[in-house]
Amino acid sequence: MNTLNGIAEAIDRLRLYFAPAETRQGILARRALGEPARDDAALSSRLVTKMQAEIRPDGSVSGGVVATIWRAHELLDLQPGAGHPPGWTQIMNWVLALQGRPGAFSQGCTPARHSYRSCEHFVSAFFSPGPPEQRIAPIMLPNGKVYRGEPAARFAISCMALRAALRGDLQRKPIEQHLKSLLLLEEQWHDWSGYFAPDVIVAGIHTLALAPPPYRGILPQLGSMLATHQAADGTWPKADLYYTLETLVTLGTPETHESVRRAVPALLARQRIDGGFGPTAPQERSLIALRALIWADTKG
């Protein structure tokens, strides 16, 4: 099958897949296609109202740390533009209180962690998903990526929290310190088989992709890094395809555009007859795939 024809057919399937979806992903998919439904604005309002009603007095959401952090992202998705959606600040106050608590990724020093500058002597301001004695992993993020290692899970959750703060343009010294810590760790990410697992590297790069202007000069380098480690079949060894594509689209550089194009055959091979991409986080992964395919279909 011609790749361009394959992209068009895959997008058409996703168009039909998302057409009846009364979900956040459905709204975002139709928005990405430039084909919002007539009642999407009203649907968005209803979803936001429901999400806000689920916020507890302390700012958390039932389901724990990941569910609460994800709710901040969901609200921003459904009410884009200037200002914070109602309830968002309440959630983020709860999330920000996790920063620097016991159990954060950066805490604890061993000879190995110290040698890779990933301990408290070098990095700080990570968010803690729970005390150190509490088992966090395995845990699935909303995009379907499962982190099975304890340090990796704590790192990925902290990055997810930092992305919410960056998307909301929160300007606080601990937020900036977390960013600086990621930039320091980035020096260790060039070795795809090194101390940091590929999916941990992807989580870090995804977060730096949302960094404010003073830090954005590193984005082409990060895009080139991911492009370098792409396999001949368009995937990334030991890295989740969907999370990597989500990160590439967020980076938005010429290097990542070409990587997304090279990943198209791998995506097309995974699409099901109904237009979706399997039972794991089905709508979220289908939304990631749609955005990647739309971008791949544009000129670099």
Image (cartoon, grey):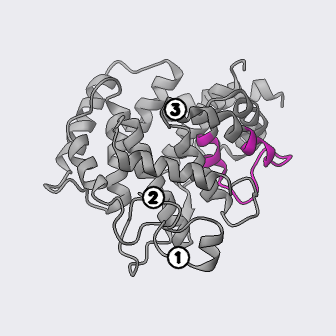
Left or right: residue 11 versus residue 191 is: left
N-terminal of the two: label 1 or label 2?
A: 1
Q: Is residue 296 visible?
A: yes
Identify the disc placed on residue 109.
Answer: 1
Cα distance in 3D space between marks 3 and 2: 24 Å
- At x 21%, y 41%, the residue is 87
**10 Å neighbourhood of mark 2: few (<14), some, or many (≥20)?**
many
- At x 67%, y 49%, the residue is 241
**10 Å neighbourhood of mark 1: few (<14), some, or many (≥20)?**
some
Residue underneath mark 3: 214
Quadrant location of the N terminus in the rendered image: top right
Of badges 1 and 2, the one in the foreground is: 1
Element at label 3: helix
Q: Nearer the viewer, residue 144 or 150?
A: 150
- Based on the picture, tell me whether residue 59 belongs to the magenta stretch: no
- At x 63%, y 26%, the residue is 294
Magenta residue span: 224-247
Cα distance in 3D space between marks 1 and 2: 20 Å
Identify the disc placed on residue 157.
Answer: 2
From this viewpoint, which residue is outermost toward the right? 232
- At x 55%, y 42%, the residue is 208
The location of residue 230, given as percent across then percent down, is 79, 46
Element at label 1: loop
The location of residue 237, given as percent across then percent down, is 76, 57
Q: Is residue 111 above or below residue 41?
A: below
Element at label 2: helix
Q: Nearer the viewer, residue 4 or 197?
A: 197
Q: Amino acid at mark 2?
A: Ile
